[in-house]
Amino acid sequence: MTTVLLTGAAGFIGARTAHLLLDRGCRVIGVDNLNDYYDVRLKEHRLQGLDAREGFRFVRGDIENPELVDSLFLKEHPDVVLNLAARAGVRYSMVNPRVYMTTNAMGTLNLLEAMRHHRVGKLVLASTSSLYAGQAMPFAETLPVNTPVSPYAASKKAAEVMAYSYHYLHGIDVSVVRYFTVYGPAGRPDMSVFRFIRWIDDGVPIELFGDGNQARDFTYVDDIAAGTVAAMKPLGFEVVNLGGGNQPVSMLDMIAILEELLGKKATLDRQPMNKADVPATWADIAKADRLFGWRPEVSLRDGLARTVEWYLANREWVRQVTL
């Protein structure tokens, strides 16, 4: 039985990844500090579904603490590390940049050091499409990503290059997976899909930054989890995009789909576009297909329908979640 140390296990992507690992017979040690960057009730909701499953153990802790990290390796003897713990969000990284570096960069370093000391040979590191800002689309992994436009992107770049150093010096096998605009049930309340569903349903004006023509390569969370697990394959050191891979969809078009699914019209409250936001994202996903046979399976319309269904089923308490 493969033992997986999964950081960020109460997170949006982390929880779905944990379920998939358990489905495949892995033992999962889930670590999360349950910080209050967004409403903890969502994290507790995700954990409720995991705590009842055989083979899952939850540890509340922070990867910024090297002693805690080392103790987990001593006690649990993981075979693989999936580092999905991160401070996420472009805009908040401009308000509190230090916590992004301490979690995303130093936390990753703590894991790499423990892997070196305890001879754990495989790391899957979650990264971000935000690194591609200003590059030609569709974004391929060969593009230089040396000009991050937010502290969030810069901290993720730091984690990537540190992981390469440990691959080069100590032979750790590393798969860096760059995620593209992940959405789905029990998603993050600071992201557009969660907010727009609730605002449309409640009849509250949508805060729309920019003119609405900015576009994203939306990727359903189950597809992202499947790609993350597939990236556990030995690869040496590879950076791999996990995205929808289709023509990016504008925010206005995404809103139109949600209006149809909810049977309600949206009111738009237009706001200036943030300097750190990018006008569009679009993943070249040929490498993921070539290396480990991954392609997304859920269309945007189907994924949004599943997300709306989850929202309506949980509306009584989800409407109380702080946005």
Image (cartoon, rainbow, N blue to C red):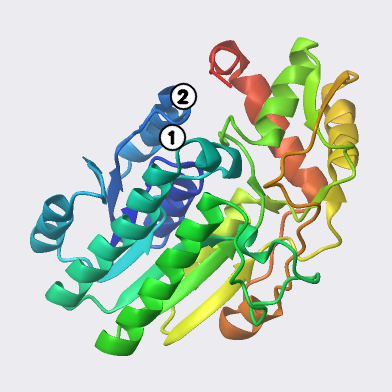
- Element class at badge 1: helix
Q: Residue at x 90, y 41 (%)?
A: 253
The reply to whether residue 232 is in sight is no
Judging by the rendered image, the residue that carries numbered circle 1 is 46
Task: Look at discs 1 and 2 and give the one toward the viewer.
Answer: 2
Residue 193 point in image, percent of width and height: 71, 35
Q: What x and y, as percent, mark residue 185? A: 60, 36
- Number of numbered discs visible in the structure rendering: 2
Give the residue type that dot 1 points to. Answer: Arg
Dot 1, how many residues are within 10 Å of its Cα: few (below 14), some (14-19), or many (20+)? many
Give the quarter of the figure containing the C terminus.
top right
In the depicted structure, whether residue 17 falls above or below residue 51: below
List the residue tagged with mark 2: 39
Q: In the rendering, at what x and y percent does residue 111 appear? A: 26, 63
**For this view, does 73 lie left or right of residue 40?**
left
Q: Residues within 10 Å of mark 2 (few under 14, many from 20)?
A: some
Secondary structure, mark 2, is: loop
Query: How far is disc 1 from disc 2 in space, using C-alphas?
Result: 12 Å
Q: Earlier in the sequence, mark 1 or mark 2?
A: 2
Q: Nearer the viewer, residue 166 or 125?
A: 166
Q: Say which of 207 and 274 sits in front.
A: 274
- For the question of whether residue 74 can be seen, the reply is yes
Q: Quadrant of the N terminus?
A: bottom left
Instruction: Please tell me in which quadrant of the rendered image residue 70 appears.
Output: bottom left
Question: Which residue is located at x 61 percent, y 72 percent?
Answer: 145
Mark 2 belongs to which amino acid? Asp
Is residue 41 rendered to the left or right of residue 69? right
Q: Which residue does the image show at 69% across and 29% down from the upper left?
A: 309
